[in-house]
Amino acid sequence: MSEKLQKVLARSGHGSRRELETLIAAGRVSVDGKVATLGERIDADAKVRIDGHEVTIKPPEDVVCRVLMYHKPEGELCTRKDPEGRPTVYDRLPRVQGARWVAVGRLDVNTSGLLLFTTDGELANRLMHPGHQIEREYAVRVFGEVTDEMIKKLQKGVQLEDGPAAFKEIKRGGGEGMNTWFRVMLTEGRNREVRRLWESQGVTVSRLMRVRYGNIRLEQGLPQSGWGELPLEQINYLRQLVGLPPEERSFVDPRNQESRQKRYARARRNQAKRLQNAKQQPRRK
């Protein structure tokens, strides 16, 4: 049975559906030697190339959906390669054969916290789609006086340059003077939306960290630039959230898993070594 090209490529782990649609529209994908068209349907035996390189097409029964939780630090870019050689979120991820990691949304360079990655491009695309209204929770430190009136405006909605926006929920989280912490919740992922909402009230975000996506929380003990593989139960929660059928298999074998405490402790040691090595390297003049 034939299926849409972008759907097959996304399921096979070659990118999110949105990314793949962009590649197809740019003429960078071919099917059986001919430039592909958006919406084209293919059979299981089709020969597909992206930028001239043949890619693996996997039937549904051969695909095992994997999802990683990643603790992004400030300073890392949400891009696969940076022309200036700056660190990216993909640098520390485990390698996968016949697929690639697709980020579920983005965090800007000065934002830290929870970032999800999956090998299932269709899952990534649906999780990012604003129509599913998936909650994102952030811890945010604001510099400037924040009044109750400002909070009411931010919850009621303000007009940004790309349309109206509002926080679904705002909770004060402590702090003194002009630096105050809040917990805020959104159900969409527009570019720099949290920062722009606060800036609309004349205050500045000095720290921003995503702590939750849906009901998946950033685990305590997971070091910055560290990752953890989600178990089948959490993967199927995400799939159910966006109307995808449940997985029956998992890449994670619970019988062979280290305890999270041991795995995260090792990751923290590796992170400390990387930081120490970076300090010892001579600076470029």
Image: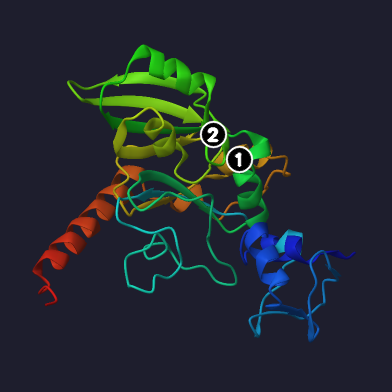
In the rendered structure, the answer to whether residue 271 lies left or right of residue 280 reads right
Indicate the position of residue 16 as horizontal and vertical percent values: 63, 59
Q: Which residue is under mark 1?
A: 238
Residue 62 visible at all: yes
**Up-down: is 52 above or below 116?**
below
Indicate the colouring scheme. Answer: rainbow
Identify the residue shown where x is 52% and y is 45%.
231
Left/right of residue 114 with respect to residue 117 in the rendered view: left
Q: Are marks 2 and 1 in contact (CB under 8 Å)?
A: yes
Viewer-proximal residue among 212 and 187: 187
The residue at the point 33 percent across, 73 percent down is 84
Where's residue 254, x and y in %?
A: 49, 47
Is residue 125 or residue 60 the one in the foreground? 125
Residue 209: quarter of image: top left
Q: Residues within 10 Å of mark 1 (few under 14, many from 20)?
A: many
Disc 2 to disc 1, how far (Cα)? Answer: 8 Å
Give the residue pinned by disc 2: 214
Of residues 188 and 178, the one nearer the viewer is 178
- Disc with the residue nearer the chain's start (2 vs 1): 2
Q: Amino acid at mark 2?
A: Gly
Q: Pick the quarter of the image with the N terminus.
A: bottom right
Residue at (41, 31) in percent of width and height: 200
Residue 210 lies, in percent from the top left, at 40, 39
Above or below, 238 relative to 10: above
Which of the numbered marks, if any, corresponds to residue 85?
Answer: none
Q: Quadrant of residue 47?
A: bottom right
Q: Residues within 10 Å of mark 2 (few under 14, many from 20)?
A: some
Type of the residue with mark 1: Leu
Q: Is residue 84 left or right of residue 229?
A: left
Q: Secondary structure at mark 2?
A: loop
